[in-house]
Amino acid sequence: MATLTNRLKTPLWAWVVITLAAIFFVLPMLAMARFAFQRVPVALLGRNTLFDRWTLDGLVDMFRDPDFRPALWLSLRISVLTVALTLLVMLPTALWVNVQAPRLRSMVETATLLPYVIPPIALVVGAGGAFRDLAPWFLRSDYCLVPFYAVLAMPFTFRSLDTGLRSIDLKTLIEASRSLGAPPTTTLLRVVVPNISSALLGTIFLTITVVLGEFTIASLLLKPTLPLYMSYSQGRNPQGALGLAILLLALTTLLFFAATRLRRRGADRKMIRIGAMP
């Protein structure tokens, strides 16, 4: 009853905005799906051919392409390494801001927004010019994408971790752990991390999404990642390339939903614990 009452209280303009946004995103997706999974000439796509000749042959051809697996495997390896680097850098930074330097929060938040301000092409050109003579082996390696992707993910990952840390009584937990004689590593791994598990999973999902969707940096550095493979495959198998793009979009959407669901579950559990306290 409460949920139904809340829905009835939603203003009409909100439903109008939601409907327009859904149309704006859903209609192009439907057009992409028809082009990717229907073996019908584009000129004949219409209401009369809506249910004609749907097939997954284009997507299956992409999976059978000998270049697909190396590109997918490279993107997965880069995703794992980017997640590890992101957590290694951003988790201590978020802890430091919340415990030692809360006054510097605005400065750190501004610094993490720099990837929105600096275009990826400028980032690659600048870093490439600096490392070309200093460490040419770095640019030759496929794993040079890892720090670039960690930087691109900063606006999302820092805020996810910061929100998780601010939702718990962090100082009390750390002081209690120290009073029991636990070293800093134990405090981090056995006290802090279990209490922000939903925020950590959200950070991991967001980082993987950035890696699977980034094209500009991989293209400029000539690294055969999955997005670059999809771009090159449009000339040979346009239907399969669009079908793979839809599949990746669905996967990243599921990751976002999973992260949101986990955050809600974490918040609900905390509310239950608080309500159960005497």
Image (cartoon, helix red, strand yellow):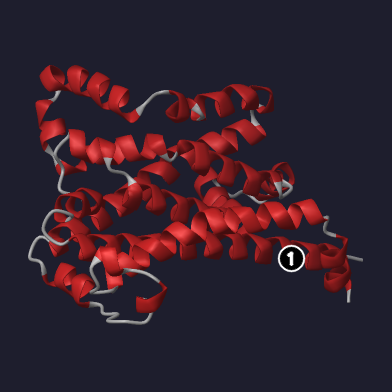
Quadrant occupied by the C terminus: bottom right
Q: Residue 52: give x, y in percent of width and height.
A: 31, 82
| Three-letter amino acid code at the position of disc 1 | Asp
- 82 relative to 25 in the view: left or right: left
Camera sees residue 190: no
Tell which of 105 and 176 is nearer to you: 105
Q: Residue 196: give x, y in percent of width and height.
A: 60, 54
Camera sees residue 220: yes
Q: Is mark 1 on a helix, strand or loop?
A: helix
Tell which of 152 and 270 is nearer to you: 152
- 84 relative to 260 in the view: left or right: left
Name the residue: 27% across, 63% down: 43
Q: Residue 33: give x, y in percent of width and height.
A: 36, 67
Name the residue: 26% across, 27% down: 124
Q: Residue 29: give x, y in percent of width and height.
A: 42, 61
Name the residue: 30% across, 65% down: 35
Tell which of 185 and 36 is nearer to you: 36
Crowd class of label 1 (few under 14; some 14 to 19; many from 20; radius 10 Å): few
- 172 relative to 124 in the view: left or right: right
Q: Is residue 196 above or below residue 127?
A: below
Quadrant occupied by the N terminus: bottom right
The residue sitting at the left extreme is: 66
Q: Is residue 139 above or below residue 262?
A: above
